[in-house]
Structures are given as C-alpha cells and as structure tokens.
Image (cartoon, rainbow, N blue to C red):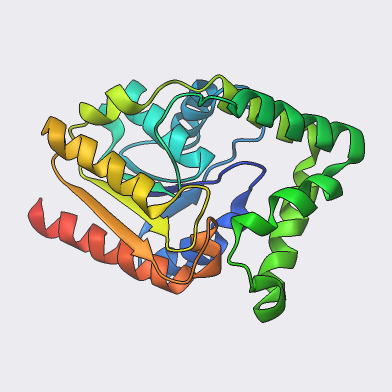
Amino acid sequence: MPTTLVFIPGLVSDRRAWTEVEQYFASKGYKTGIADLYSAVSIKAMAQSVLEQFTGQIIPVGHSMGGRVAMEIARIAPERLQGLVLVATGAHPLAEGELSNRERVIELANTQGMQALCDQWLPPMLRVDIRTTDPKIYNCLEQMVLEAGATVHERQIRALIGRPDAQPLLAALKMPTLLVAGELDTWSTPAQHQKIADSMLAAKASFGVDVQIVNGAGHFLQVEQPEAFSYLLEGWLEKQSSQS
C-alpha cells in the first residue's frame, strides 16, 4: 500500500488551506488526503483523529497548528510515519503572556463576531500586499475563517493552550523531517524553524533534517505560493525515495 501524504490544516482552517497543493500531488500520482480537525478538543485528540481518518503509512504535512498535530502523531504512532513535514509551526510550550493573548482573541470572536476576529488576525498571517495583488487568496481565506465560526475557534485555541511540549519529542525523532517557513512570516519565523532544526541536529536523533524557505510568503505560505511550496516538497520526497 503506498504512503499517503496527509495535509493537516491549521487554526480555523479546512481543506481550502491545502487544496492547490493536494491537487498538485494527486496529479503527480501521489496518494493524498486532507485531514479534518474541526471536532477534536485537544492536540492529542486531533492526532488520533488523523490516524483514524487515514490507514497505513503516512507522511503528515502539518501547517501551523497542524504542525503541532503532526508532531503529536509522531509521538503516539511513530511506526505509521515515513517522514514528517512541519510548515510554519513551532515546538515550544506555552510562552509567557501567551495565555492572556489567547483569551483575548477568544473573547473578541465570541463577543464581536468572527468578522472582527478575521479583520484582526488574518492580515498579519499573509504578506502585506496580498489584498491588492491577489485578492482571491485573501477572500478565500477570509471566508474559510468566517465559516469556521466562534465555537471551532475557541475549541482550537484551547487545544493550543493545552498543547504538549514538543521539544523533547523532536530531539528523539527517528524519521526524516522537513521544516518549511515563509520568508515573510512574522508569527513562525524562518529563524524559529532553524532553531528547531539545530536542536534536532544537536541531539543527533533524526535520520535527516532539512529546512526550506518559501520566498515572498507569509504564514499561509502554501496558499500564497503553492507552486513554490509544492516543488520544494516534491524535491524532498524524491530525495527521501532515492535514499530508501
């Protein structure tokens, strides 16, 4: 049975965050799927849900919160993974001041509505000129966030608040790992991804760690630059295949 590329969305995201990339790989003959995280109440429950949605060997490709889910999958079912791809994400535990910031955005969505939340949250997630240069991207993501709704938003934020510390896991990984960051991402910066890779390499625990940067993209790099992201992921997959 071929390995499935499982694309995992991030916060208040659904298959629209991965559609173009998933279609590219499906057209190339890869077995693909996009996970649904909407009903799970914790990062662990999300990981278990993904494992139930897809059978056999997988390569999780997780974006943002989805990267946290991918790391949890690697924790609870490493035997199912042929590799791990972490996109615009982090491995650190709850940071100082993060709880109060997270509670504020929950209150904003619950009291003023998802449009108010979207207007505040989404623009910094993208390169600054995208609303004028490619409004279709912004409009698609805005609609995705609005349709997620305040209940899903709060559920997923609280899952992130209670997330496990992934740093010890990364130091012990025994599978090829790719980290991808957007050049213009101020939320999950390229430097943050390099720091994760450096800690993994220092632990000498991984079969291989690669860091790639997608130029001209912010946090939603796979939506902003789907071709560039797909090409670099395809190159990494081909390298892993040639080494196996």
- Coordinates of residue 238 in the picture (x, y in percent): 21, 62
Q: Is residue 61 left or right of residue 127?
A: left
Q: Is residue 79 left or right of residue 31?
A: left
Q: Residue furthest right?
A: 112
- The residue that appears at 25% across and 58% down in the rendered structure is 237
Give the vertical position of 135 relative to 154 (above or below).
below
Decide if residue 1 is in sight here: no
Q: In front here: 39 or 196? A: 196
Q: Residue furthest front?
A: 96
Decide if residue 20 is in sight here: yes
- Coordinates of residue 239 in the picture (x, y in percent): 16, 60
Q: Is residue 238 left or right of residue 138?
A: left
Q: In front here: 200 or 2? A: 200
Q: Is residue 67 left or right of residue 2?
A: right
Give the vertical position of 68 relative to 117 (above or below).
above
* Image quadrant containing the N terminus: top left
Q: How many marks?
A: 0
Q: In front here: 120 or 143? A: 120
- The residue that appears at 17% across and 33% down in the rendered structure is 174
- Coordinates of residue 145 in the picture (x, y in percent): 73, 49
- The residue that appears at 59% across and 28% down in the rendered structure is 98
Q: In front here: 204 or 54? A: 204
- Coordinates of residue 116 in the picture (x, y in percent): 84, 47
- The residue that appears at 50% across and 40% down in the rendered structure is 66
